[in-house]
Amino acid sequence: MPAQLRHLRNASGFTLVEMAIVLLIMGLLLGGGLSVIGAQIDQQRIKDTQKTLDDARDALLGFAIANGRLPCPATATSNGVEVPAGGGVCTAPYNGFLPAATLGIPGGDANGFLTDAWGTTANRIRYAVTTANASAVTTANGLRPPSPTNMSNFAPDLRVCASATGITATTCGTATPLTTNAVAVVFSLGKSAGSAGPDEAANQNVDQVFVSHTNTATFDDMMTWLPPSSYFNRMVQAGVLP
């Protein structure tokens, strides 16, 4: 074949080897780009979920100011309504859901539950409330006279610990306590929406002890809680207490 024709054939396109190399490089670049985009989406969802938790805590305080008590948690079948209606002794104080319908929070799912930024049924926002002093905080005016419980002797007992290692059903045990007297705890199960390890499992059993720390390979729950000082300050400012 004349040299000129060979030159034209070679210049007319890529060889199979060259095309394979180009496709491999494009695949690597695309995969890396998708990984970066996925990480950015997760970070935004974490940020949005944290705001949802903070807004939920504010909604709980607003409800308490209006009703003289905190709401009970919703159950899985109550369509976002507290159980029992009207408060008192809660049906699921430690393993319930945020009662978004009772709180009047917009943006809930079709069943009346508020979810985190991952938006699945498993990602419904969880809510626990103390049963201390005969469920005084979920009983209307349970911290006002003539109730025997008041701000001075109210002893909320929800615990948040830095690890599940060493905890018991009622205390942080040998784990570092982050709070030992939370009035309420609001949390998300995060992207995994499950119990990947003992720390996440501790947030889904039926007791008053919870775990919170930075994300790891086996823990992505997100949590906020209501300390008694914040609860009392808002209630006193609003004239609901003492």
Image (tube, grey):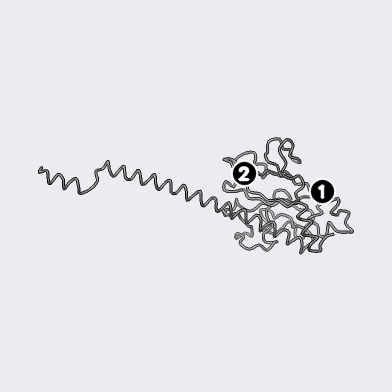
Residue matched to label 1 = 155
The mark nearer the N terminus, 1 or 2, is: 1
143 vs 102, left or right, is right
| Vertical relation: 235 (above or below) 185 | below
Q: Is residue 197 left or right of residue 233?
A: left
Residue 143, above or below 202: below
Using the image as rendered, state which of residue 31 and residue 194 is in the foreground.
Answer: 31
Q: Which corner quadrant holds the C terminus?
A: bottom right
Q: Which residue is mark 2?
A: 214
Toward the viewer: 112 or 224?
224
The residue sitting at 86% across, 53% down in the picture is 149
Q: Position of residue 177 (x, y in %)?
A: 73, 41
The percent coordinates of residue 140 (x first, y second) are 81, 60
Question: What secondary structure is found at the residue carrying circle 1?
Answer: loop
For residue 2, what is the image quadrant?
top left
Residue 52 x, y percent position in the rendering: 63, 56
Please tell me how crowded label 1 is: few (under 14), some (14-19), or many (20+) other residues with Cα within 10 Å. Answer: some
Instruction: Name the residue located 16 percent from the left edge and 48 percent from the top edge.
Output: 8
Quarter of the rendering containing residue 208: top right
Looking at the rendered structure, the kind of residue marked 2 is Thr
